[in-house]
Image (tube, rainbow, N blue to C red):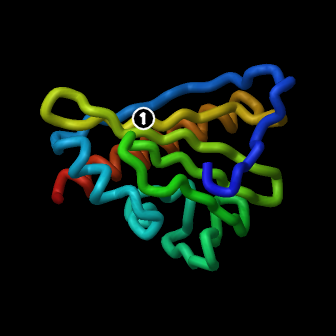
Amino acid sequence: MAGGTDWMTTDSTPLESRTFSVTIDRDWRALYDAIWRPEFFPRWASGLTDGELRREGDDWFSQGADGPVRIRFTPYNDFGVMDHVVEGADGDVHVPLRIVRNGRGAEVMLTLYREWGIDAERFAADARWINRDLTRLRSVASRG
């Protein structure tokens, strides 16, 4: 991760997690090349931003669902990794995001961690939000 974020200490108990995916009928490398830039995220990631990202150096800032956030994105790479760390008032949230080959197309996978202090209702709501955002990504990215 850019900046060397230690988002979880090594002695932490593993968090509950769920991985969500969406299949997109587009070559995975072409898809990655089209959507990896932080500037593309406002087109689909409503849970990350209210629609505007501001860049300051290597960091990005926005108004997130729970207030102002600072976001650090993984740089461009050959592996389809689009991880990012969202730093807000409640702490840092690591968001693993991957694009992998699925036949002629692509699979986009996002893992949601149930952070400490998040109740089951909020975790379920976050899961629904991610599924809406991934559906939006499929719609936006399928158009080329």
Left or right position of 67 against 108: right
- Residue 62 image offset from top left, x and y in percent: 62, 71
* Quadrant of the image occupied by residue 25: top left
- Residue at x-position 47% and y-position 48%: 82
Left or right position of 134 against 101: right
- Residue at x-position 75% and y-position 35%: 115
- Residue at x-position 43% and y-position 49%: 133
- Residue 112 image offset from top left, x and y in percent: 59, 35
Front residue of 105 and 10:
10
Residue 62 seen in the current view: no
Q: Is residue 127 above or below residue 134?
A: above
Identify the image quadrant of the C terminus.
bottom left
* Quadrant of the image occupied by residue 10: top right
- Residue at x-position 36% and y-position 45%: 78
- The residue pinned by badge 1 equals 109
Give the residue type that dot 1 points to.
Met
Q: Is residue 66 above or below residue 103?
A: below
Describe the element under mark 1 as helix, strand or loop.
strand
Give the number of callouts: 1
- Residue 126 image offset from top left, x and y in percent: 59, 41
Residue 16 seen in the current view: yes
- Residue 86 image offset from top left, x and y in percent: 67, 55
Left or right position of 139 against 132: left
Give the crowd class for mark 1: few <14, some 14-19, many >=20 residues within 10 Å.
some
* Quadrant of the image occupied by residue 131: top left
